Image (spheres, rainbow, N blue to C red):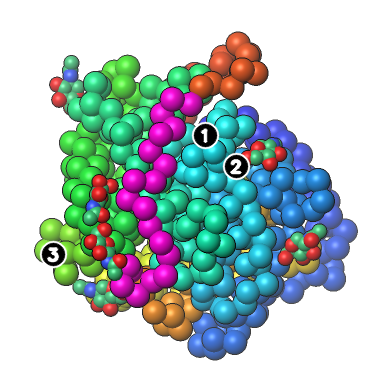
Amino acid sequence: MKLFSHTSSRVTNRSWTTLLVSGLLGAQVAQAIDLDLGSTASIKAAAKEIAHGMVKYYTGNNTGDVPGNLPDPYYWWEAGAMFSSLIDYWFYTGDSQYNEITMQAMLHQVGDDQNFMPMNQSRTLGNDDQAFWGMAAMTAAENKFPDPPEDQPQWLALAQAVYNSQVVRWHTETCGGGLKWQIFTFNNGYTYKNTISNGCFFNIASRLALYTGNMTYAEHADKTWDWMVQIGLISPTYQFFDGSDELKNCTAMDHIQWTYNNGVFMYGAANMYNLTKGDQKWKERLEGIIKGANIFFSKEPPDVMTEVACENNGKCNVDQRSFKAYLSRWMAGTIKLAPFTRDLLMPKLQASAQAAALQCNGPNNECGLRWTKGAEWDGDMGVGEQMAALEIIQSHLIDEVGGPANNKTGTSKGNPAAGGTSQDIQPPSEITMGDRVGAGFVTTIVLVGVIGAAWWMVS
Ligand SMILES: *[C@@H]1O[C@H](CO)[C@@H](O)[C@H](O)[C@H]1NC(C)=O
Ligand SMILES: *[C@@H]1O[C@H](CO)[C@@H](O)[C@H](O)[C@H]1NC(C)=O
Ligand SMILES: *[C@@H]1O[C@H](CO)[C@@H](O)[C@H](O)[C@H]1NC(C)=O
Ligand SMILES: *[C@@H]1O[C@H](CO)[C@@H](O)[C@H](O)[C@H]1NC(C)=O
Ligand SMILES: *[C@@H]1O[C@H](CO)[C@@H](O)[C@H](O)[C@H]1NC(C)=O
Ligand SMILES: *[C@@H]1O[C@H](CO)[C@@H](O)[C@H](O)[C@H]1NC(C)=O
């Protein structure tokens, strides 16, 4: 995942084009998506329209294209995230029209070791990137998405494979533990231990524990949480900071905060809460995380989710435009597994869904990024914007579905030993010196860290 990637100028150009388009069409198209949260039919209709707008970007099922890949400028991980949204879309609405492309894409990207590490993605393959596909497979098992043909890898086994390949990457030589962001030394960010990678691992481990009842997974979830607190990446007020550099033994960190870091831990904690049958420790943590999420909800209009670090300054990159999708997804999942959180989370889900529907007011009802802007389309559009609107709206169907399946109620076949052999993966031969130094990751991160710190001080 390229948190601080160099795609912003390309995005700006596209925004200008879309602004122009909106200017020309503005008179006719001022018609946001209708949404009545009291009506299941209305929620489904809105979700259907937005899902259609999202899948329009996907070209992987065209002849000659690669199933599972989104076109430039979307990175590989975001496609995994998108298919996870479509698995939820089918689960919540019963509309199976995208199941075929989802099955095809997921199975095409499993890689040689059947653990979502396709060799030719290794330049964009960090622990978080791999995990977004792994979490999609976990969701497929939990939702009882149709199982793959018997000669293909199965959903639960794929999630276990991702877990197994990551658990051995737990790195104790620096910072007292943690996962590094990157898997391969040749990728920029190899010395960075970041919150999303550790959060995804925590999320998968806690879900595997609840699904299988195997407490080994829960032990590793516990360990990950404790390490995050020890390093200070989770603050005493449950702020989740971006990450920390092992070159300084994780004594300094980038304090920027993203919605998905809160969400990935919120849902993991909800799984631990449910697994422990309402243990007080996990209840308190869950309440803390939910309170910590308040920084992502606007005061005016009230309770509308916003990517506070980059929406107001116009600096959300392509990845970041999708992050609200994951906080939305995991807030809904949290209500399911920890019903006591409903009153805390539902007002925010409702206000945000209404605001998102209004913002789906671009050409062909494409959704903008800034839900706080009401029906005044902000000129942005893309896979991330569509996915975020889809997730916040379809999450209002949670009462139409049951809780996640487990190995008594589910159908997916597991393999506790899946996917363990890929640690020896070699760097692709085409990696050049330019790739190694080109992205200027370290410089960017220092800069963003300084700006991020300053930004948090003034606000
Ligand atoms: C790809 O999938 C989409 C969504 O299901 C569908 O509308 C489209 O026709 C498919 N394209 C091809 C070439 O099959
Ligand atoms: C990458 O590898 C897959 C097989 O895992 C192949 O289908 C695809 O064409 C390759 N190239 C790209 C750009 O994904
Ligand atoms: C590095 O950090 C870890 C965790 O805080 C700590 O236990 C360890 O002593 C530190 N090592 C050094 C050399 O400072
Ligand atoms: C569920 O998983 C646990 C732990 O892996 C195993 O002991 C148990 O037999 C499984 N139950 C079923 C019904 O598969
Ligand atoms: C529980 O999970 C651990 C870790 O993946 C594995 O080694 C062990 O075999 C599993 N136990 C069962 C009963 O599935
Ligand atoms: C655990 O989740 C189920 C839904 O899957 C829910 O019915 C149950 O109440 C939850 N347990 C606790 C302790 O909240």
**Residue 426 visible within the image:** yes
> Residue 354 location, x and y as percent?
54, 73
Which is nearer the N-term, disc 3 or disc 1? 1
Q: Residues within 10 Å of mark 2 (few under 14, many from 20)?
A: many
Q: Name the residue under label 1.
A: 125
> Residue 444 location, x and y as percent?
51, 23
Q: How crowded is mark 1: few (under 14 residues within 10 Å), some or many (20 or more)?
A: many
Inter-mark Cα distance, 3 to 1: 36 Å
Inter-mark Cα distance, 2 to 3: 37 Å
**Residue 453 visible within the image:** no
Residue occupying the point 80% across, 69% down = 29
Q: Mark 3 points at which residue?
A: 279
From what the image shows, is residue 193 above or below residue 309? above
Inter-mark Cα distance, 2 to 1: 8 Å
Residue 358 within the segment the image draws in magenta: no
Mark 2, mark 3: which one is toward the viewer? 2
Q: Which mark is residue 287?
A: none
Residue occupying the point 35% across, 42% down = 164
Residues marked 2 and 3 touching at CB (< 8 Å): no
Q: Residue 76 carries which label?
A: 2
- Tag 3: residue type? Asp
Dot 1: element:
loop
Which is nearer the N-term, disc 2 or disc 1? 2
- Tag 2: residue type? Trp
From what the image shows, is residue 244 above or below residue 304? above
Q: Number of callouts in the render?
A: 3
> Residue 454 location, x and y as percent?
40, 32
